[in-house]
Amino acid sequence: MQESLESLVGLLESYRGRDKIIRTICYGSQLVGGVLSEKTPPGRPSSSDLGKSLLLFSAQLSQCRTVLRLFDDVSMLAYSRSYGLGAQEADGGLRWISVLNNVADQLYYPCEHVAWAADAKLIQAKSDRWWLLSTGLWGTSLLLGTLRSIRLLVLLKRKMKRCEGAGEGSSRSQLLRQMRREMLTILSSMADLSNAIHWMPPGFLWAGQFPNWLVGLMGTISSVIGLIQMNASNGDQ
């Protein structure tokens, strides 16, 4: 119990950990709120009211995360500069996918900032087009991230075959952990990408067709995977 509490406190005291906790609660509230709002039996208005309250709570947490992301540009720029053109990557395909992914991520933040500022009436602009652009960049980043993980899986499988031939059991175990991590990343990205498409203009694939509970479910899946990966990463360190 004490270790679990200390782990939770450690997460909440770090920016990335706190963001993941807020994200999980945000989508979890949307999932439960969506279910209660849609499936309230006759004579049970209290459940419907609770569902609406949870949806409002989820919206407030989402707004909180948007405001906190106002300060992410510099850290993203620092990461993009350190990665550069990916000269440290041995695989050319992996390198250019990562570079394009960094570009999409870097452009996402200012677009979202402008959309937020327009909604807050801080600037005179139409926020719709900026939200659309930021959502498109987010979806592009998720798609590129998925392609990067698929490429990594292919490379890891090749390494595993070489390890099996050389009889290196410890290396094989490490490669299996890396492969599981990339498979979880793909699942997380696909869950988020389904929501990104939902938030695109009507007529684009399944845009606008997800009920609140399904958006919450996809986001919760992605958020829980993120927490698992962060915990695994901390354990490795």
Image (cartoon, rainbow, N blue to C red):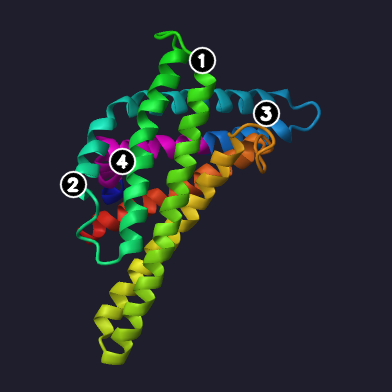
User: Circle 2 sits in a helix, a strand or a loop, which is it?
Assistant: helix
Measured Cα–Cα span from mark 3 to mark 4: 31 Å
Whether the residues at callouts 2 and 4 have beta carbons within 8 Å, the answer is no
Whether the residues at callouts 3 and 4 have beta carbons within 8 Å, the answer is no
Dominant secondary-structure state across the stretch colored magenta: helix
Residue 68 visible in the snapshot = yes
Please tell me whether mark 1 or mark 4 is closer to you in this view. 1
Please tell me whether mark 1 or mark 3 is closer to you in this view. 1
Q: Who's the residue at 29% across and 84% down the image?
A: 163
Apparent side of residue 125 relative to residue 35 in the rendered image (left or right) = left
Residue 223 visible in the snapshot = no
Q: Which amino acid does label 4 sit on?
A: Gly
Q: What residue type is labelled 1?
A: Lys
User: Circle 1 sits in a helix, a strand or a loop, which is it?
Assistant: loop
Please tell me whether mark 2 or mark 3 is closer to you in this view. 2
| Label 1 vs 3, first from the N-terminus | 3
Q: 55 or 41: which is nearer to us?
A: 55
Disc 2 designates what residue? Answer: 82
Disc 4 designates what residue? Answer: 17
| Disc marking residue 47 | 3
Please tell me whether mark 2 or mark 4 is closer to you in this view. 2
| Label 1 vs 4, first from the N-terminus | 4
Q: What residue type is labelled 2?
A: Ser
Whether the residues at callouts 1 and 2 have beta carbons within 8 Å, the answer is no
Q: Who's the residue at 41% across and 26% down the image?
A: 112
Residue bounds of the magenta highlight: 5-27
| Label 1 vs 2, first from the N-terminus | 2
Query: In this picture, is 42 found above or below 193?
Result: above
Disc 1 designates what residue? Answer: 126
Whether the residues at callouts 2 and 3 have beta carbons within 8 Å, the answer is no
Please tell me whether mark 3 or mark 4 is closer to you in this view. 4
| Label 2 vs 3, first from the N-terminus | 3
